[in-house]
Amino acid sequence: MARRTIVLGLILGLLAAANAVPFDFYYLILMWPGAYCEDSDNGCCVPKYGYPAEDFFVKSLQTFDLSINKPIVRCRNGKPFEANKLDKIENSINHYWSNLKCPPTDGVNTWKSAWNSYGVCSGLEQLDYFKAALNLRKQADILGALAEQDIKPDYKLYSTEKIRRAVEQKLGVAPGLQCRDGPFGQKQLYQVYLCVDTDARTFIKCPKLPATLSCPASVVFHPFYTWMLNSTAASGAGAAFESKLLLLTETMLK
């Protein structure tokens, strides 16, 4: 019986490898929810499964092909997404791969989209793909790396180069940074791009970063606390949600 189990495991592993499409590296994209919520027209809501962590979230783990200069998506012959396969990592994925959109969601469509877009191209089993992304997020510990250099989400302006150096000092590789519109015409830190080897475990120097990444010399690091999220359930498809973000004054940016 044990022998049969081993043989079956080997067969499944070979099938997964056969379905994999060659790619050069992963982009691990981590999102700061404070920036997302501040710039969202509808504010942010507590997901149906409960409060997320006050930390950087996984946005995606993308398979990238340098020969075509873009992510590989929606590979053929990929296994269909099965939500129950994520039960073993339910707590981690709810906390660190959250969808804060309003009206509230259960996150399943977010994870399904990630799997169908990139996971099926990775050659990993579904659970292993999501575990890899969450483990890399934990290993990167961007919030901790920034805090070590006294960079905190407190509305202040911080040097973009100092942010880059803080991450590089911890991980040994420089990140790509993406900013978006913030308060009073300032830009704010939104996403951090890290490159990962095809083993889905090792951070590497980025062979290439998206040309669309853009941040000015100084950016706002907007606070994020779970009490800022709207916890009122929508009464209908067109229900409006009131933002609970603090009203910012220009003096906070100095």
Image: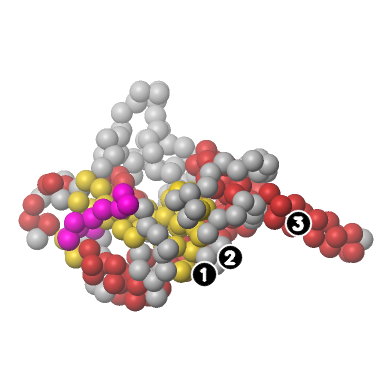
Q: Position of residue 94 (x, y in %)?
A: 50, 50
Q: Is residue 25 left or right of residue 211?
A: right
Q: Crowding near pointer 3: few (<14 within 10 Å), some, many (20+)?
A: few
Magenta residue check for 217: yes
The magenta-colored residue range is 211-224
204 lies above or below 25:
below
Name which residue type carries label 1: Thr
Q: Secondary structure at mark 2?
A: loop
**Disc 1 and disc 3: Cα gap in Å?**
23 Å
Q: Which residue is mark 1?
A: 202
Q: Which residue is mark 2?
A: 199
**Which quadrant would the C terminus be assigned to in this image?**
bottom left
At horizontal 80% and vertical 60% (from top left) the residue drawn is: 10
Of the pair 29 and 65, the residue shown nearer to us: 65
Of the pair 198 and 242, the residue shown nearer to us: 198
Q: Are circles 2 and 1 on residues that touch, CB within 8 Å?
A: yes
Q: Position of residue 247 (x, y in %)?
A: 16, 46
Q: Which residue is mark 3?
A: 14
Q: Crowding near pointer 2: few (<14 within 10 Å), some, many (20+)?
A: few
